[in-house]
Image: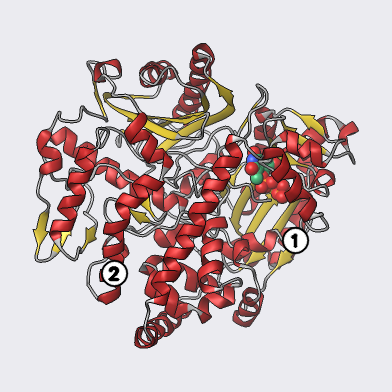
Amino acid sequence: MDGVDKEKVQRVVYEMSKGSKYFENEERKEALIRQKIEHMRARAAKLSASDLSHYQKVADKRILELDSTRDLSRIWLHVDMDAFYAAVETLSNPSLKGKPMAVGSMSMISTANYEARKFGVRAAMPGFIARKLCPDLIFVPTDFKKYTYYSDLTRKVFWDYDPNFMAASLDEAYLDITKVCEERSITGAEIAEELRSRIHEETGLTCSVGVAPNRLLAKVCSDINKPNGQFVLPNDRMAVITFISSLPIRKIGGIGKVTENILKGVFGISTCEEMLQKGSFLCALFSHSSSDFFLSVGLGLGETDTPEARFRKSISSERTFSATEDAALLYQKLADIAKMLSADMQKEGLSGRTLTLKLKTASFEVRTRAVTLQKYISSSDDILKHASNLLKAELPISLRLIGLRVSHFNEDKGGVPGAPTQKTLTTFFKSGDASRRTGDDQRSLGSDLSDLHFISEKETAISLENNETCHHEFGDPFERKHLSDIDDKNCISSINAYEMEKIDELSSNKTAAMVNTTDVKEWTTKSPKRDLSRVSEDDSSVQREPEDSNPDRLNKEPSTSGNEEFFSLNQMEMLFWVDDYKCSLCGAELPSSFVEERQEHSDFHLAERLQEEESGTGSSSLIPRLRIVPKDCSGSQNRRKKHKSSPKQGMHLPIDSFFTKKSSGQ
Ligand code: TTP
Ligand code: MG
């Protein structure tokens, strides 16, 4: 966006979208961010000098510990294709060369070429706004087959440099080039040059590359000399520290708009180095894993190992389109998604028995509905059959997005990545904990996140016509591993004054958050009570139940140990993110930008619940319970009562819990 008249862009965007649902949603998001900042500020203001001095010591110690883990032995390369969809379209229609063009529709554009970007046109911008910014803008519809084809060509090249490369999306990948550099006695810079020219030879497309000692930095570096450029950060501690010192925090994968706003608005942190300077506040107010992440960013640390293959948890596919209430059209879209999902599952030999339907209504409310079957399914017919039942129960409805997700895999068959049919997917799955974007950008494998839509980084389309397009979150999945170990250490297991306060706030904010969260509010108050038989079949148990189908469930006493309380889904069945970073069920803290971790976290609660439902018991051994230490147990019981009083509690899964999103970031 350099050289763009930002004020003009902002004015046009404001004028064009004012009054629309999109605009209202954006305003609501902004308001909630402001509220969150205020809340955080108030917490920070309560810290006394002695508290801060204590947390300064904590931070100093942690900084030393983290620094001692620095690994400068690996060379990572991040590659990102330039204006990918637009470049592919220009290859097939060279007359587009040099003209401003965007891929997408009047509803929304997926990307724009660099000529159009000069006007402020960017990905995930409604096309009609883009046209206002750039009246000569040419629109080209998306063609995912083409993008997948070219993506595969690039992956063949990546393979030659690192057979275990980690594909982050259709047009992005991480390669560990340590070995190839050693074997050929050449530098990372030389490999980068060579790889870029090979990609160009194979595809006719350009890409940009970053080379650095870890993945977090490599991704930052690939953006520095975009398009068609490269940047190499040497494996040298001082070079890294200098590089990171003035780097704006938003450049870091995992720090999105919300996190950026909070860090800036509350602590005045704009650069990575300031993370270290404000370490005492970060340690005082965030969970260990979050503060560790922030401090690591300040030190320029990132992942250096290739994640081991591990159990895949889910696979999903979603589609955004212009809002419609035409049931036939909605079923048609559902069928298309079922087909795509089934194809992905079959490619990987996956079958699963929990099917989740995600819907985004015309007013941007996000709902999820799930069904757990007795049989494992993978065929598009089976998926469609059950998905149709779920959808049917929601009709009539006006929707702008439908997604499907299958989880609860058959471990014998599909729980582990099998021998993939395509090389590229081997590594795709090797990422394990990555938020994945698939070969088809209409699909988002595996991940999702329960980022409430009001703070979501995701841009949403204003529907003006019937073109379909998609968007999803583009974080850096691989840099969020720091939060993937959602366990006791993410929760509050030993108490001190501040942690106590955090818990108090959690307790008191829970109700407030429910009121403030449109998704939750609408869901709990407006959604009509459903007849379960409409969505269940003989062979299935639906993941929602009548309010009192199991009256004991919500009344059950928590198991306690001393003053510790273990919350389970039996007591609080609805997960949402209090203040957008605390799990309403267990208090684990996960900022919204930690998409994958939130996904896992939701999965844990979901799996726990499923197991309870299946076993008919109130306890689950599947997942270690997350611990939270309430100040007084009666408060928590009150909360449970509140939950019970809501007619929908326990009947539905939380907002946006199952699908990836994508930011608008350019
Ligand atoms: P990006 O790599 O983010 O963008 P880009 O390749 O178009 O441009 P550059 O990397 O040079 O900045 O995304 C890759 C493709 O993903 C993009 O071409 C289109 C698609 N996409 C969307 O569909 N929606 C989005 O919001 C974004 C950002 C990308
Ligand atoms: Mg790109």
Circle number at residue 501: 2
Residue 303 appearing in the image: yes
Q: According to the image, label 1 marks what residue?
A: 230
Q: Quadrant of ligand 1?
A: top right
Mark 1 or mark 2: name the one nearer the start of the chain: 1
Q: Position of residue 204 (x, y in %)?
A: 81, 41
Judging depth in this view, the residue of 185 and 548 nearest the camera is 548
Name the quadrant of the N terminus: bottom right
Residue 355 appearing in the image: no
Q: Residue at x 39, y 71 (%)?
A: 43
Most distant residue in the front direction = 19
- Dot 1 and dot 2 residues touching (CB under 8 Å): no
Q: Position of residue 532 (x, y in %)?
A: 25, 20
Judging depth in this view, the residue of 362 and 111 nearest the camera is 362
Judging depth in this view, the residue of 545 and 646 nearest the camera is 646
Residue 62 vertical position relative to residue 402 in the rendered view, above or below: below
Q: Secondary structure at mark 2?
A: helix
Residue 295 vertical position relative to residue 306 in the rendered view, above or below: below
Kindly identify the amino acid type of the residue bearing the numbered disc 1. Answer: Gln
* Side of 292 where 319 appears, left or right: right
Residue 615 vertical position relative to residue 487 in the rendered view, above or below: above
Judging depth in this view, the residue of 61 and 240 nearest the camera is 61
* Side of 440 where 307 appears, left or right: left
Kindly identify the amino acid type of the residue bearing the numbered disc 2. Answer: Glu
